[in-house]
Amino acid sequence: MKKFFISSAFCVSLLFSMSFAISKVSANEVQDESFKSSNEILVSWHGTANLVSDAYNNITSSNNIFTDSPVIISDASNKATVYIMVVNESGEQLGSIKTLSPGSSVTLGPIPWDSGTYTIKGKAPSSSNEGVYTFTVD
C-alpha cells in the first residue's frame, strides 16, 4: 500500500509539472507573437483633423519605444494637398515637411526610438482649403 501511495504521488507530481511546463511555453509563444506584431505597425489610427493655413495642427500622437516610420494616408475625399510634419515632445521637427495629396500616402521618419511622444501635424495649403481632413496612420 505504501509503494502504491508513493508511486501515485510521484505520477501526480510528474503530470502537474508537465502541464505547468506546457502552459509556460504556450504563454511565451503568445508573448513573442504580440512582440512581433508590435514591430510591424507601431501606430494604427484613423480619424479627422481640422487643418488651417497659418499653423500646423495636431493630427495624432504616439509614444514610441522603437524606431518608427509611420505611413500617413490622406483620404481620397480630402479637398486639397496638405503639408505634413513630425515633431518630438520638445517641439523639434523630426525629418522634412512632406506634401500629401488626397488618396495618396507618405512615409514619415524614421523617428528615433528615444524621441518620446511624437506628434504628426498638418497644415492646409491656403485659407480656401481650410477644414476637416480625414487621415489613416499605420
Image (tube, helix red, strand yellow):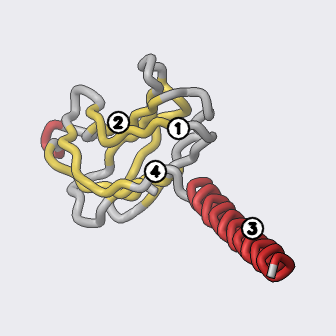
* Residue bearing mark 3: 17
Secondary-structure class at tag 1: loop
Examine the image and state in which quarter residue 16 appears: bottom right
C-alpha gap between disc 1 and disc 4: 9 Å
Whichever of labels 4 and 2 marks the residue nearer the N terminus, that label is: 4
Q: Position of residue 85 (x, y in %)?
A: 43, 35
Q: Nearer the viewer, mark 3 or mark 4?
A: 3
**Disc 2 target residue:** 121
Q: Residue at x 62, y 33 (%)?
A: 112
Q: Sequence order check: which comes first, mark 1 or mark 4? A: 4
**What amino acid is found at the position of numbered circle 2 in the picture?**
Lys
Position of residue 41 measured from the top left corner of the image (x, y, whole percent): 53, 57
User: Crowding at label 3, few (<14), some or many (≥20) Cα neighbours within 10 Å?
Assistant: few
Q: Earlier in the sequence, mark 3 or mark 4?
A: 3
- What amino acid does circle 3 point to? Ser
Q: For residue 14, which quarter of the picture?
A: bottom right
Q: Report the mark closest to the observer, 3 or 1.
A: 3
> Dot 2: what SS?
strand
Quarter of the image that includes the N terminus? bottom right
Disc 4 to disc 2, C-alpha distance? 15 Å
Contact between marks 1 and 4 (CB within 8 A): the answer is yes
In-front residue for pair 81/18 = 18
Q: Which residue is mark 4?
A: 43
Mark 2 nearby-residue class (10 Å; few <14, some 14–19, many ≥20): many
Foreground of the two, 52 or 61:
61
Q: Which residue is mark 1?
A: 64
